[in-house]
Image (cartoon, rainbow, N blue to C red):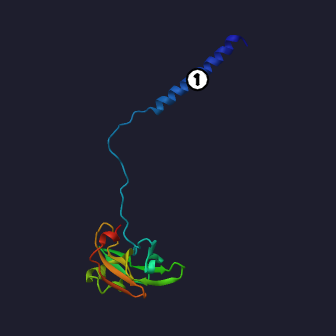
Amino acid sequence: MNKFSNISAKALSLAAGVMMMASLSLVSCKSEKKTDDIIVDKIVEKPQTGPQRMSNDETNGSVTWISGAEYSYTILRQASDSLDVIENHEKKYYDNTVKLVVRRADGTVFFQKKFSKTNFSNVLPENVSKSGVLLGMKFVEAVGNELHFVVGVGSPDETYEEFYYVQMTLDNFGGTRAEEFKEKAEKATE
């Protein structure tokens, strides 16, 4: 082999590589029609196959109450299969229960009860009692020998602002009473 044939082979292989790169770049730089249209998949709402559930919710807190003692509380909201299914704005929902547990500083249980909407039916308007679900319970404040809670009953669909507040009072003997919630709404929503 002479030295020119060796150079020619290298030149040929280099030329072939350059031609391949050029042809690839021509293929990948193909011109397409550009538009400002944004294409997204159409969201089709699936028909409801059964009653919907609100998510479970747990709140824990503490309060200084009788004789300056610390009490802790747990409020647990859960959907219930055993309660009536509620129809609200053409959708069906499981109603909820709310379990309230109040413990003394030593951890012993002072009060424990599971509430449903029927515990507050004496103060609920008929339409709320019929088509609302028990949305939840929040601690408001301690006043004398009472702990005040606010209870919400209404539409579980957040697009509707339909709810009714009830004040639930727990006294130092473990008794409860429900009444229309007229004041302190801002404390309950904090």
Q: Residue furthest right?
A: 1
Displayed quadrant of residue 19: top right
In the image, residue 11 lies at what x, y percent?
61, 17
Q: In the image, is residue 39 above or below residue 22?
A: below
Secondary structure of the residue carrying tag 1 is helix
- At a point 54% along the width and 79% down the height, the residue shown is 107
- At a point 70% along the width and 11% down the height, the residue shown is 3
| Marker count (numbered) | 1
Pick whichever, 121 or 89, lies toward us.
Answer: 121
Q: Residues within 10 Å of mark 1 (few under 14, many from 20)?
A: few
Relative side of 63 to 18, left or right: left
Displayed quadrant of residue 7: top right
- At a point 50% along the width and 28% down the height, the residue shown is 23
Does residue 68 show up? yes
Q: Amino acid at mark 1?
A: Ala
Write down the residue under mark 1. Answer: 16
> Which quadrant, please, contains the N terminus?
top right
> Which quadrant, please, contains the C terminus?
bottom left
Pick whichever, 26 or 132, lies toward us.
Answer: 132
In the image, residue 17 lies at what x, y percent?
58, 25
- At a point 50% along the width and 80% down the height, the residue shown is 104
Q: In the image, is residue 121 above or below residue 1?
A: below
Pick whichever, 132 or 123, lies toward us.
Answer: 123
